Amino acid sequence: MKLAATIVIVAALLPCACPTPAVGEGEGEGEGEGEGEGEGEGEGEGEGEGEGEGEGEGEGEGEGEGEGEGEGEGEGDQFVMPTRALCAGSLGSASTVDLVDGAVAEASGIVPSPTTPGLLWLHNDSGDSARLFAVNTSGHVLGELLLPGVAPVDFEDLAAAPCPDAAAACLWVADTGDNGGARASLAVYAVREPAIDVATSFAPRDAARVWAFPFTAEGGPADIEAFVALPDASALVFYEKVNDGARILRLDAPFVEDTPVQARISSHFDTPGTGTTLRLATGADLHPSGARLLLRTYQALWQADLATVALDDVEATDFVQVAQPAELQGEAACYDEDGTGVWTLSEQVTVGTITLDNPLHHLPCVQ
């Protein structure tokens, strides 16, 4: 989104406002007579029930060969989001980290890697190709992760959660911007996260696996820039970019690849803040514990304590302002890898003939 901005927002210190996420269901494949990863007994065409050794029970279908040889799905190793602490104090003054590479000029989404310390993932707003940027916390753009087969319309937000198969960590990309209310459908892409060395740059590489989940919004077209995935990937929640009466939309698992569905309206809310021009939701993040919701507007950062309210039923009064980043067009925000601090980032803004840089800002938790 482009917003003509001449406003300088002053950074402020404000108070910073868990059940363990459920283990998601996963699928594993194994071949063999009697035993394997998802051990089972073949019957008929291979339909059967398998019991994994020490891993639990799973049911699956496979093609039986010979005397029970076959391939079946069983319960294997499953990725679980890392445990991260909550801030018990306030957010402190922001430190600035310059982005060394200017490729992320229109940053709209940011999330810390769920597997690699010191790594952030970012993406640009509309007009860019289907790619994510791996950036270390020193501001160096390490490389690009390409999304093969994806033709983006308007990437707007980014989340981390288990992949749809629960076998690994995924980066969930919301292609949900719709400024003119003209899109026939929106989409979310789940991108398997690769292993990255935060000290080494890499050439652009294709993601090993990308899932596409197209959807429409109940009630008609929706412009959405704020989105979260539950820590166990059991649901996706979207916050419409309007001042008052914004729809909160929800998609629940299981997600069926390449099959259009409708996101249902869970509730409506008035975006927190004052006035009308800058009181729009431009980003969101759910703490990995599921205990807090971070909401970004052009005005400020807001937080809701989910111990007292449901994620998809928040009201403006449920939010407490926790910071005012010094950013003219801030659209990206996330909890840091510790869970206690916050990262924020603005798009580049041109004022007259001057283009302002868009550094990363980190706000630590101060006890």
Image (tube, helix red, strand yellow):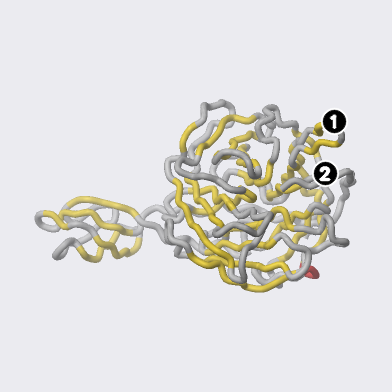
* C-alpha distance separating marks 2 and 1: 16 Å
From this view, report whether residue 320 is shown above or below residue 136: below
Q: Secondary structure at mark 2?
A: loop
Q: Nearer the viewer, residue 77 or 208?
A: 208
Label 1 element class: loop
What is the x, y in percent for residue 155? 61, 48
Residue 186: where, in percent of width, then height? 56, 57
Numbered marks: total: 2
The quarter holding residue 293 reads bottom right
- Give the mark nearest the N terminus, 2 or 1: 2
Residue 349 left/right relative to 116: right
Instruction: Determine whether 47 is above or below 81 in the image.
Output: below
Query: Does the image show residue 225?
Result: no
Q: Which residue is mark 1?
A: 353
Residue that appears at 58% across and 51% down:
175
Q: Which mark is residue 328?
A: 2
Q: Are marks 2 and 1 in contact (CB under 8 Å)?
A: no
Instruction: From the top left corner, tell me how far across and down residue 140 is, in percent.
Output: 66, 29
> Of discs 2 and 1, which sits in the foreground?
1
